Amino acid sequence: MDFFDAVARRYSIRAFEDKEFERDKIDQILETINRAPSAGDLQTYQVYLVRSRNLREALARAALGQLFIAAAPMLLVFCAVPTRSSIKIGQRGEALYALQDATIASAYAQLAAAALGLGSAWVGAFDEDAVKEALGISADEVPVAIILIGYPAESPSLAPRRDLADLVREA
Ligand SMILES: Cc1cc2nc3c(=O)[nH]c(=O)nc-3n(C[C@H](O)[C@H](O)[C@H](O)COP(=O)(O)O)c2cc1C
């Protein structure tokens, strides 16, 4: 699929078919994540691949009761690891780049899913401690995004965007 088609097909899906998808699609998504740029090429994040129903339900509860999360066959939980950045880059790496690295990788995952004909949604509203507890995440990791991926069971209308004339200022 053309890159721009994948971008156009990336919109939030919050209802999923009750079927898993092929292992090679998972691998392609993971390979795509691994190609994402990161500050100093440090890749200061950890990705948790979640498929068990129990864990999906625990994460749905951690995400303030957004129960549709549990219906996605696969979740990718992106956690920033600021200490990985602070060692080499210092304060700016710790405070900013680690978050940006994890965020960019999350966006790559959504685009890869779209290119593979899968639906996805980004969930950012969650209780960090509850997510950490559910996944047994160590203290130095900061959950940044839960990305839901699966075959879509809905066709939502496109969310509106700002006019480019408002969004972009020529400097
Ligand atoms: C940082 C961030 C946090 C988000 N958190 C949530 C969330 O907690 N729950 C949810 O249903 N959608 C969440 N979304 C998805 C947005 O609501 C969605 O991307 C936006 O409305 C635009 O719609 P689209 O994705 O269909 O283009 C989040 C998106 C981002 C980038």
Image (spheres, helix red, strand yellow):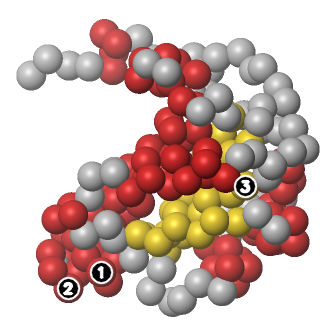
Gap in Å between the C-alphas at discs 2 and 3? 32 Å
Q: Identify the residue shown where x is 19% and y is 69%.
A: 92
Residue 164, percent from left and from top = 34, 13
Residue situated in front as seen by the camera: 120 or 145:
120
Residue at mark 3:
74
Gap in Å between the C-alphas at discs 1 and 2? 6 Å
Label number found at residue 84:
1
Residue 136, percent from left and from top = 66, 86
Q: Is residue 90 above or below residue 151?
A: below
Residue farthest to the front, as pictured: 24
Label number found at residue 87:
2
Question: Is label 1 or label 3 in front?
Answer: 3
Q: Identify the residue shown where x is 32% and y is 84%.
A: 83
Residue situated in front as seen by the camera: 67 or 9:
9
Is the Cβ of the residue at disc 1 closer than 8 Å to that at disc 2? Answer: yes
Q: Is residue 51 above or below residue 16?
A: below
